[in-house]
Structure formats: C-alpha cells, structure tokens
C-alpha cells in the first residue's frame, strides 16, 4: 500500500491535518488531525510502498512499546487511512 500523493499534511493553527474531500456532492470534507506519532509515521512512509509490518517496525524502533502494542496501533493507523481512502 502507499499513501496517495494527492493527500498532503497541512499545518493549520498549529495543528497538523489531512483534508479528505467527500466523494459525492453531498459528502462532507473530513479533517484528520495527526498527533506526533501519526505525523512521524506519515512522514516516514509517504512516497513509498509499505505494509503494516513496516509501521510496526517504525513504532518499536522509535517508541518504548512492546510488539503487541505496536501491532495493535499499526493496525488502527492503517485502518483509519483505509477508511478514508488515503491509501492506494
């Protein structure tokens, strides 16, 4: 999977966000706020192919988390991006 290049992180009023336009005229725009960890993952993985296991490695290398926690967090992060069609 890969973060689609049309999605960019913007800093608005000190908050790092990604704006996702609705697909249909009646759909609302979704704003996803990125915390420090999410921004780190985004910046580390943007522009390249990756799998959930790559997210786990990044989390365990940078943060003091056990592998089970990293797997859970990586799964949630990837699922959020998939839910909003940010991954291709």
Image (cartoon, helix red, strand yellow):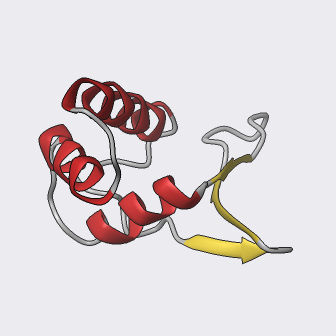
Q: Is residue 45 left or right of residue 38?
A: left
Compared to residue 56, the image places residue 18 above or below, namely below
- Relative depth, front residue between 21 and 86: 86
Q: Position of residue 75 (x, y in %)?
A: 32, 29
Compared to residue 82, the image places residue 50 above or below, namely below
Q: Residue visible at 35% across and 37% down?
A: 78
Q: Residue visible at 32% across and 27% down?
A: 69
Q: Position of residue 65 (x, y in %)?
A: 32, 39
Image quadrant where residue 9 sits: bottom right
Q: How many marks?
A: 0
Q: Is residue 55 left or right of residue 73?
A: left
- Relative depth, front residue between 9 and 26: 9
Q: Position of residue 58 (x, y in %)?
A: 24, 55
Q: Position of residue 29 (x, y in %)?
A: 74, 47
Q: Residue visible at 29% across and 49% down?
A: 59
Q: Residue visible at 32% across and 36% down?
A: 74
Q: Is residue 51 left or right of residue 70?
A: left
Residue furthest out toward the right: 13
């Amino acid at each position: 999977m890969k973060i689609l290049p049309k999605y960019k992180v913007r800093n608005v009023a000190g908050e790092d966000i990604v704006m996702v336009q609705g697909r249909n005229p009646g759909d609302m725009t979704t704003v996803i706020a990125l915390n420090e960890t999410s921004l780190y993952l985004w910046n580390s993985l943007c522009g390249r192919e990756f799998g959930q296991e790559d997210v786990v490695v990044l989390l365990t290398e940078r943060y003091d988390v056990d592998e089970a926690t990293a797997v859970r967090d990586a799964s949630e992060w990837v699922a959020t991006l998939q839910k909003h069609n940010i991954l291709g």
